[in-house]
Image: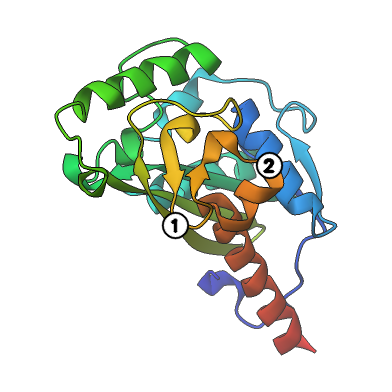
């Protein structure tokens, strides 16, 4: 929570604006918040048209910095609204933590959606092609989520462990999901339902950690 909130009543938002243009992230976040009765709006619903300036927001070296930059930028355009932004990515041990914060555009493709996912996944398979031992292909998904609401700000992080498969499995999820084998679920995220993935995913854990902060503040204010 930011210093500017000192002495103010802590009240969790009942509705949030999802600061993302990614349909996959938007749907996942909406489902996760919906489980807890928190209403969501996307940027189009909130009247925020795409702006070329958004492309310059994710230029930082940590997930937290990128998420914070997006949350603050959109919050300035939506005064009084609670704005949620996340930055997430895949960290592969054998690649020194890459693609990391560069996960979305790692391949250099200018495509969007499924075409971009395919390009990134193909590059990942090429980069790890020399590693046949599953134990040498360990990786984790990381998500940092930031909520900005007036003078208040919250940050939370979630991770999930796994490894990179030699070939895609399933058609669910998005991004690197068909190649990410979840240690906890014992199958690829691409093979999971949204609810199954949400129970252990980096994004689900980050949002639950964020809600825990809200709950603590509400309890302290009573």
Q: Nearer the viewer, residue 33 or 129?
A: 129
x, y percentage for residue 207?
61, 58
Q: Name the outermost residue toward the left.
A: 130
Q: Is residue 112 visible?
A: no
Can you say which quadrant of the picture contains the C terminus?
A: bottom right
* Residue under numbered circle 1: 159
34 left or right of 110 in image = right
x, y percentage for residue 88?
45, 43
When asked about the image quadrant of residue 1, the answer is: bottom right
Q: Nearer the viewer, residue 171 or 206?
A: 171
Residue 74 vs 7, above or below: the answer is above
Residue displayed at 49% across by 50% down: 186
* Residue under numbered circle 2: 194
x, y percentage for residue 46?
77, 33
Q: Secondary structure at mark 1?
A: strand
Measured Cα–Cα span from mark 1 to mark 2: 17 Å
Residue displayed at 50% across by 18% down: 52
């Amino acid at each position: 929570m930011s210093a500017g909130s000192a002495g103010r009543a802590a009240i969790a938002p009942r509705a949030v604006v999802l600061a993302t243009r990614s349909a996959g992230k938007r749907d996942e976040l909406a489902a996760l918040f919906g489980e807890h009765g928190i209403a969501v709006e996307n940027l189009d619903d909130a009247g925020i048209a795409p702006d070329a300036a958004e492309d310059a927001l994710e230029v930082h070296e940590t997930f937290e910095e990128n998420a914070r930059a997006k949350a603050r930028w959109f919050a300035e355009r939506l005064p009084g609204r609670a704005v949620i932004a996340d930055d997430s990515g895949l960290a592969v041990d054998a690649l020194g933590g890459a693609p990391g914060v560069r996960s979305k555009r790692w391949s250099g493709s200018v495509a969007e959606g499924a075409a971009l996912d395919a390009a990134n996944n193909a590059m990942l398979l090429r980069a790890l092609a020399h590693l046949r031992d599953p134990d040498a292909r360990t990786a984790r998904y990381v998500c940092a989520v930031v909520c900005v609401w007036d003078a208040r700000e919250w940050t939370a992080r979630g991770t999930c462990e796994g490894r990179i498969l030699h070939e895609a499995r399933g058609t669910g999820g998005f991004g690197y999901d068909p190649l990410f084998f979840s240690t906890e679920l014992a199958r690829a995220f691409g093979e999971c339902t949204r609810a199954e993935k949400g129970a252990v995913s980096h994004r689900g854990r980050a949002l639950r950690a964020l809600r825990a902060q809200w709950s603590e503040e509400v309890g302290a204010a009573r």
